[in-house]
Structure formats: structure tokens, C-alpha cells
Amino acid sequence: MSKRFRPSLLKYGVKKSSSDIMFWIIELFKNVIAWVVSPISNLYIRRRRLRLLVHRARFLITGQECYFINGTNLSHDRDLEITHIWFDCAPRVYILQNDRPLPVRLRPDESWETWIELEKLPDSIRQNPYTLARARLSNGYIVKSRRNLNVPEVGTVPGGPIRFT
């Protein structure tokens, strides 16, 4: 090691042993990594995230069997707005419920759910539409669904009261 390098290490409190120099280099490397990763991780945390899940169930009051589409805002500190929900098949089947008007704004960790009757879906997707639901956010981003495997046997439908007619 050159004599010019040692005085600068001593200035930072690093002794002359090789283990101390290695410790200083590792700490410097960790600080550089943290400096580079921090802005990227902040962008990831601040991004809008919607989880879109689909499950099959029936209303207890009417016995009507439906597919339920549940959206949950997983954003850390941002609201998001869902403007459209549909099933991506030919032809597209848009979900329009009077009891669940769109657009809907979700606060962080808030969930909202809508449904479509089984008969309104084409026969070709009726048995397995779990990955075909789509939600469009107000920024134009399209979110794809997945199957909800963790559904309680009995529960409520998030998003407000339902009028059965």
C-alpha cells in the first residue's frame, strides 16, 4: 500500500492493519449501495398497486351464483381509482352494477368488490375466468386478476350495501 493512501485512511480513523482496511472498504461499499438503491426503493414504495382477485360464490339471500371481483389498494400511501372492470374474452364482458358504480376511489389498504352473474359470461370462460378479469386505473394502467384461494365460507361484499330486487 502506498504511503499517500495511508494518511487518508488514518484521517477516517482506520488503523494500519489489513482487517481494519477491509472493514472500511466494506462499509464504504455498503454506503454506496444504499445511496444507489434508496431512490429506487422509494419509487417502488410510492407506486400504485392494485391486487385484483376473482372467486366464485353465491348470495345467501337469492342463491344467485356469481363471480366476485375484489380489488384492494396495496399502495403504501396513495389513493387509486378504478375506472373500468371487464373480463378479457371475445366479446369483452364489462361489469356494470348499480350497487357498485364506477369509477371508485380506494384509500391505501381499502378493498372494494363487484360481481357478475354466471349466466352473463360466455360458455367458453364460464368454468375458469379467474385470470381473465381486468381493471383499468385512472392513469391508464391495466391490472390482471388471479384466483382468490383464500375465501371465507360466509362473508360480506366490501363496497357498501346491496339492494336485492
Image (tube, rainbow, N blue to C red):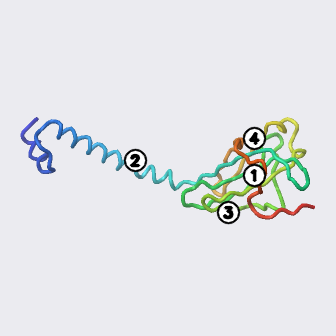
- The residues bearing labels 1 and 2 have C-alpha atoms spaced at a distance of 35 Å
- The residues bearing labels 1 and 4 have C-alpha atoms spaced at a distance of 13 Å
In the rendered structure, which disc, 1 or 3, sits on the residue that comes first in sequence?
A: 1
- The residues bearing labels 3 and 4 have C-alpha atoms spaced at a distance of 23 Å
In the rendered structure, which disc, 1 or 4, sits on the residue that comes first in sequence?
A: 1
Name which residue lies at 75% across and 40% down.
130
Name which residue lies at 69% across and 53% down.
71
Q: Is residue 36 left or right of residue 100?
A: left
Is the Cβ of the residue at disc 3 closer than 8 Å to that at disc 4?
Answer: no
Q: Which residue is under mark 3?
A: 105
Picture quarter with the N terminus:
top left
Mark identifier at residue 130: 4
Q: Which residue is under mark 1?
A: 85
- The residues bearing labels 3 and 2 have C-alpha atoms spaced at a distance of 31 Å
Q: Mark 1, residues whose alpha carbon is within 10 Å: few (<14), some, or many (≥20)?
A: many
Tell me if residue 25 comes above or below residue 60 in the rendering: above
Is the Cβ of the residue at disc 1 closer than 8 Å to that at disc 3?
Answer: no
Is the Cβ of the residue at disc 3 closer than 8 Å to that at disc 2?
Answer: no
Q: Where residue 10 sits: x, y (%)?
A: 11, 47
Q: Is residue 126 left or right of residue 35?
A: right
In the rendered structure, which disc, 1 or 2, sits on the residue that comes first in sequence?
A: 2
Task: Tell me where residue 80 sits by quadrant.
Answer: bottom right
Secondary structure found at label 1 = strand
